[in-house]
Amino acid sequence: MSVEENEFADLEEEIIEIKEIKETSSESGSELPDNKKEVFTVETQLPMKCFTKPIIGDEESKYYKIINVLIPILIAETIYLIVIANPTMRAMWLIVLMLIAAFVVYNLVIRPSARKEEYKRIRNNGEDEVSYTFYTDCMKLEVAGKESILRYDSAEYCTENEEFLMIMFPGKKSVILDKSECSEDRIDFLKNVVSEEKNTEHRKDVSSKMLLIIIVMAAYMIMQVVCIVQLSKARSIADEYEYMTRYQQTTYESFIDCVEIGAVKDVVIYDSIYVEYTYVDEGKEKRYYTEYYGNEDILAKILNNYSINWEKKTTE
């Protein structure tokens, strides 16, 4: 390669580098080229509801409505389980109820309150008064005397509700417009700022996350229903069998300890829930019962290993 060709190649590389620097600065800088064609300008004052309530589309709103229905059901089921459960299980369900209550309080009280305080700060600093100037391929954002240029091709997604339209940019920068202040032509222009591919990808991402939350909540709710059925069944058995009032209840751990030292005989398992047994101490026998919610086969194996006679009975 000749000297002239080398110099030409170096010059070409420098031109490419300068071009890349200009493109980068136009995306995040505050300088606007003189030849930009202005489409329209909007000056607005952002209301508090823009900060205290999320701006979400119809599809996301459906998921939120489902979650809002599931939460009261989960709370009601948990409270019912606390009422009917034994002391050991009651402590666990109390912890679950406190976690659900903490989630509700955070989202309904603490988070909105923090956003209101943030809005007060923004309003005191004059940052709620915003000016948007839209061009063909970018926009100028003016807030409290500061300007920034946002390129449309860097926008992440666009969403709207009945009142507002929001365009989200990198760095958690958002452009929020009151739809009542814009004509239909302007709203259509803003909707087309973000490609449909990006909006579709955003909706899919949000839908997958919200759907996962709903599935987890639904699975937990089903587990609660199973526990309620089991405990309700146990209560009906307790009402039917007289031994529940005649015999003293012990913990399952205490029962196993007695089995291991050979102080148990004549075990009866009722409906895979209650275990009635005779405790032998220095020739004296006394009848007890305990609750068992584990695997019946495991319990049977333990009894067989210690050569303890046992039988299974049902309410039927």
Image: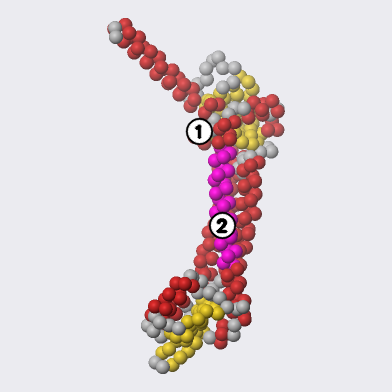
Nearer to the camera, 302 or 184: 302
Q: Looking at the image, which residue is at 59% across and 31% down? A: 196
103 is higher (above) or lower (below) than 303: above
Q: Quick check: can you spot residue 86?
A: yes
Inspect the image, locate mark 1, and give the three-letter code of the amino acid beneath it.
Pro
- x and y percentages locating residue 262 in the rendered image: 39, 84
Residue density around tag 2, few if under 14, some if 14–19, many if 20 or more, within 10 Å: few
Q: Mark on residue 87? A: none
Please provide the residue range marked out in magenta. Answer: 202-228
Nearer to the camera, 12 or 306: 306
| In this rendering, position of residue 66 left or right of residue 152 | right
274 is higher (above) or lower (below) than 282: above
Residue 217: say if magenta.
Answer: yes
Secondary structure under badge 2? helix
Residue 16 location, quadrant: top left
Q: Looking at the image, which residue is at 52% across and 17% down? A: 33
Q: Which residue is mark 2?
A: 219
The quadrant of the image that shows the N terminus is top left
Nearer to the camera, 184 or 44: 184
Q: Which residue is mark 1?
A: 170
Q: Are marks 1 and 2 in contact (CB under 8 Å)?
A: no
Farthest bottom residue in view: 283
- x and y percentages locating residue 12 in the rendered image: 38, 13
Q: Looking at the image, which residue is at 45% across and 74% down? A: 299
Give the overall secondary structure of the magenta segment. helix
Q: Earlier in the sequence, mark 1 or mark 2?
A: 1
296 is higher (above) or lower (below) than 120: below
Secondary structure under badge 1? helix
Report, in whole angstroms, how far the alpha carbon at label 1 lies from the one at label 2: 35 Å
